[in-house]
Image: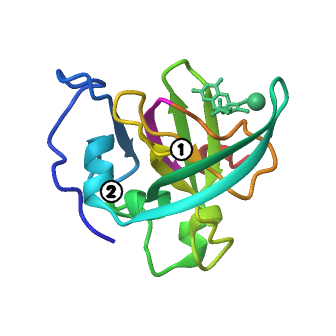
Amino acid sequence: MSRPIAASRTGPTSSAGAVSFSVCGEVAEPFTLTVAELREGWQQHRAEVTFDCATSGPQHHRFEGALLYDVIRATKPGFDPRRRKDRARFLLAVSGGDGHQTVLSWAEIDRDFAGSPILLATRLDGHGLDTAGSQLVVPSDRCGARYVSAITSIWTGACGALTA
Ligand SMILES: Nc1nc2c(c(=O)[nH]1)N[C@H]1C(S)=C(S)[C@@H](COP(=O)(O)O)O[C@H]1N2
Ligand SMILES: [Mo]
């Protein structure tokens, strides 16, 4: 895992037209990233995926990007990293620019649990997502609903509010 090269930018959009997104929540070190910073600051992984869309049928894409796990770990989530039960309380909420949202659990991306190689994409079918924004890539999903595009924020926090 590497650290972001430049994490000082704030606001949803930079002046150069490259969109940025916030990585925030119950974390010690929240930051804002452009897609270029996501590409340069973290090891890039590839995923060739097929998912089904309810309205447009099967979609096939090649993505490149950073592991969601690596990026969120860099924010230092507010759990004890040595305690599996503490980590398993955490959720991630990913929001797109049009208001589309999805939720993941920390255990989906943690290697002691499901360890799914979920990506924050920097390229789609060979084209940079610098102006479109990053897209969530969930290779294990059969349908495309969690492939949130034009990401504006990723919130990480505990599910404490769910206790009855
Ligand atoms: N921001 C945003 N992302 C989104 C959606 C959306 O409505 N808004 N729809 C999802 C659905 S239902 C599908 S099937 C895929 C479609 O991805 P594609 O257009 O790259 O094939 O995007 C997903 N990501
Ligand atoms: Mo879809």
Predominant SS of the magenta segment: strand
Residue depicted at x 41% and y 36%: 129
Q: Amino acid at mark 1?
A: Asp
| Residue bearing mark 1 | 125
Residue depicted at x 69% and y 49%: 163
The CA distance from mark 2 to mark 1 is 29 Å
Residue 28 appearing in the image: no
Q: Tell whether 49 sits left or right of 14.
A: right
SS at mark 1? loop
**Which quadrant of the render holds ligand 1?**
top right
Few, some or many C-alpha atoms within 10 Å of disc 2 (few <14, some 14-19, many ≥20)?
many
Q: Mark 2 or mark 1, which is nearer to you?
A: 1
| Residue bearing mark 2 | 75
Q: Amino acid at mark 2?
A: Thr
Tell whether position 151 is magenta. yes
Q: Quadrant of the N terminus?
A: bottom left
Badge number at residue 105: none
Q: Give coordinates of residue 147: x percent, y percent.
A: 63, 40
Residue depicted at x 37% and y 44%: 23
Farthest-out residue, front: 126
What's drawn in magenta, residue-wise?
Answer: 150-158
SS at mark 2? loop
The mark nearer the N terminus, 2 or 1, is 2
